[in-house]
Image (cartoon, grey):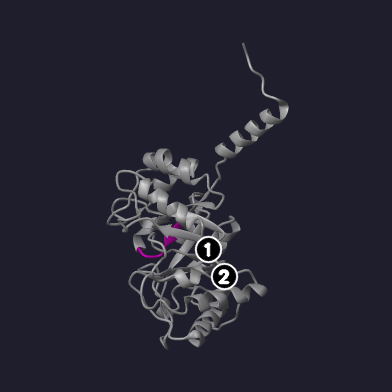
Amino acid sequence: MTCKLSAPLALIFLVLSVLISISYAGTIVVYWGQNGGEGSLADTCATGNYGIVNIAFLATFGNGQNPALNLASHCDPASNGCTGLSSEIKACQNQGIKVMLSIGGGAGSYFLSSAEDAQSVAQYIWDNFLGGQSGSRPLGDAVLDGIDFDIEGGTTQHWDELAKALNGFSQQRKVYLTAAPQCPIPDAWLSGALNTGLFDYVWIQFYNNAPCEYSGNADNLKSYWNQWTSISAGQIFLGLPASTDAARSGYIAPDVLSSEVLPTIKSSSKYGGVMLWSRQYDQGYSSAIKPNV
């Protein structure tokens, strides 16, 4: 004896099965700039593996300091030695790759002392890296796509005002805002900025953070991932070290990532992809995971 579903019930089951199996395609993001041996920016983009490249870092700014890039041994910004990167930035953008300037970092000297300081820093960034005008643009005349907040020290204050000020320039030309908080939520440094709801992409550092990183199983990671997908932001990315040498902990082998982690997190409508630290350590990792991201 067989039992046939009515047409409406069959349709409902079909819709449910489709919803359950939905998987969102993602992008791989990489940080470039902190090791002279990682190859050029142009070569990084030419791999075809990345959709977004973060130039790291504008490491000194705010509180009356003269803003300064730190691009390791790639070039010397103090002698205008980084303006040649302009053609490489444009080459990346011509391939459809977004190129961001990452501000902060783990070892920078940055601090925002007031709302006025945040506004001043935003104006400097707009004039020197985005759509504004300056006679001393450190990366030449290329216009970057936006600003990445990798804030890991200094102060917890005024990052929201910096985000709002940068977003204000989007009336003239779109400024993408991205952030790289640590995976414990709320983030100690960027919580206020993220609460503005202005960030297009947020790549969470699921490494060097024992409570929420992968450690033999993905239970904690998935739990924290679900919390992060509830914030007001465009897309959420899983931030990972590209090798065991790239971080103290949190590395996930490509096959484990593809089998144990990605199938779950890709079901989120906010899933954006995977962020890697960094190009220097990406010796095949992005190629291995790209088919499944």
* Mark 1 and mark 2: Cα distance apart in space: 10 Å
- Percent x, y of residue 224: 41, 54
State the residue at coordinates (57%, 73%). Answer: 130
Question: Of residues 231 and 102, which is closer to you in this image?
Answer: 231
- Percent x, y of residue 97: 56, 57
Q: Which residues are magenta?
A: 30-35
List the residue tagged with mark 1.
99
> Which amino acid type is marked by label 2?
Ala
Q: Which mark is residue 283?
A: none
Against 47, residue 78 (above or below) is below
Q: Quadrant of the N terminus?
A: top right
| Residue 34 belongs to magenta span | yes
| The quadrant where residue 255 appears | top left
Question: Of residues 205 and 35, which is closer to you in this image?
Answer: 205
| Residue 182 belongs to magenta span | no
Against 10, residue 109 (above or below) is below
> Which amino acid type is marked by label 1?
Val
List the residue tagged with mark 2.
142
Against 291, residue 51 (above or below) is below
- Percent x, y of residue 133: 60, 81
Local secondary structure at mark 1: strand
* Residue 167 as seen in the image, left or right of residue 185: right
State the residue at coordinates (37%, 40%). Answer: 256
Q: Are marks 1 and 2 in contact (CB under 8 Å)?
A: yes
The reply to whether residue 171 is visible in this rendering is: yes
Of marks 1 and 2, the one in the foreground: 1
The first of marks 1 and 2 along the sequence is 1
